[in-house]
């Protein structure tokens, strides 16, 4: 899993997820409101290089921060596209997944490895996650996101602790609560995708069927979170094949 291969697989995962025919999402067949397929493809291309950078850093030093390039990736994601940030959640899950994958050659242990590295005490990563939320949500029309207050979360010692605090701070319909619940419950949606993606047909048909099954099983989960977990699962699947 050299750094160039990491970038290729991330780029492929972002593209396959974006173009696949998924219920309620932007696909190669349709755009939604102020979100377009071209924006998702451009954002993916803009950010894939940062996963090569983190891979290079990890290979030199296994204590590299998980979210070292998160802010740079977010800032660069909007180059040559609309102003609205659309891939915050996707980067949020992909950085720890890629980090864990570089350190884990056993597909059956990748979820546990991801959660383990997120539990490691690292205040720099916590700070970066909070700054990234503030940056990404500047383009949101949601007042809760626009007025995001970082002070109540700054004492968290690890990314995992931050997510757990989200579950205690926000109601169950809030995306931050749902992100926290995913970690608290062991990334169940990601596990579902991994158990169902078999690529018995073409990969796009498989993604379509798997996504729609997972969505129907988790009707109360924000569709963006499901899409982000889908992309992460595609990366894991491709990286072990």
Image (cartoon, grey):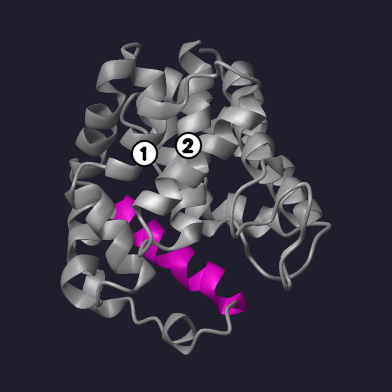
Quadrant hosting residue 181: bottom left
Q: Is residue 92 visible?
A: no
**Camera-side residue: 238 or 204?**
204
Q: Can residue 175 be seen in this view?
A: yes
Residue sitting at 39 percent across and 81 percent down? Answer: 148
Residue sitting at 55 percent across and 68 percent down? Answer: 136
Quadrant hosting residue 167: bottom left
- Disc 1 target residue: 190
Q: How far apart are marks 1 and 2 (CA)?
A: 7 Å
Q: Where is residue 53 in the image (x, y as percent from the top left)?
A: 57, 31
**Camera-side residue: 241 or 56?**
241
Q: Does the magenta stretch include residue 129?
A: yes
Q: In this view, does 26 lie above or below 141?
A: above
Secondary structure predominantly adopted by residues drawn in magenta = helix
Which is more N-terminal, label 2 or label 1? Answer: 1
Q: Where is residue 72 in the image (x, y as percent from the top left)?
A: 59, 52
User: Which mark is drawn over residue 118?
Assistant: none
**Camera-side residue: 213 or 124?**
213
- Disc 2 target residue: 232
Q: What stretch is highlighted in magenta?
A: 124-139
Q: Is residue 118 left or right of residue 176?
A: left
**Camera-side residue: 34 or 23?**
23
Q: Is residue 86 left or right of residue 29?
A: left
Q: Is mark 1 on a helix, strand or loop?
A: helix
Q: Does the magenta stretch include residue 15?
A: no
Q: Position of residue 23 (x, y in %)?
A: 59, 54
């Amino acid at each position: 899993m050299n750094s160039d291969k990491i970038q290729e697989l991330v780029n492929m995962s972002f593209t396959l997820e974006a173009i696949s025919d998924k219920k309620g999402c932007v696909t190669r067949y349709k755009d939604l409101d102020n979100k377009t397929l071209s924006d998702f493809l451009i954002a993916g291309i803009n950010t894939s290089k940062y996963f090569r950078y983190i891979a290079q850093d990890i290979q030199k030093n296994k204590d590299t921060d998980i979210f070292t390039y998160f802010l740079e990736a977010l800032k660069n994601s909007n180059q040559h596209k609309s102003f609205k940030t659309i891939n915050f959640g996707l980067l949020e899950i992909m950085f720890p997944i890629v980090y864990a994958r570089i350190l884990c050659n056993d597909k059956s242990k990748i979820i546990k490895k991801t959660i383990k590295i997120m539990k490691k005490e690292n205040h720099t990563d916590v700070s970066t996650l909070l700054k990234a939320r503030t940056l990404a949500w500047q383009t949101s029309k949601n007042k809760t996101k626009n007025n995001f207050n970082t002070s109540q979360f700054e004492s968290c010692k690890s990314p995992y602790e931050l997510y757990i605090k989200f579950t205690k701070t926000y109601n169950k319909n809030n995306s931050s609560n749902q992100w926290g619940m995913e970690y608290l419950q062991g990334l169940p949606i990601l596990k579902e995708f991994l158990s169902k993606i078999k690529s018995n047909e073409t990969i796009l048909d498989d993604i379509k069927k798997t996504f729609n099954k997972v969505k129907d099983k988790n009707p109360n989960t924000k569709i963006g979170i499901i899409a982000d977990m889908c992309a992460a699962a595609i990366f894991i699947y491709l990286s072990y094949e």
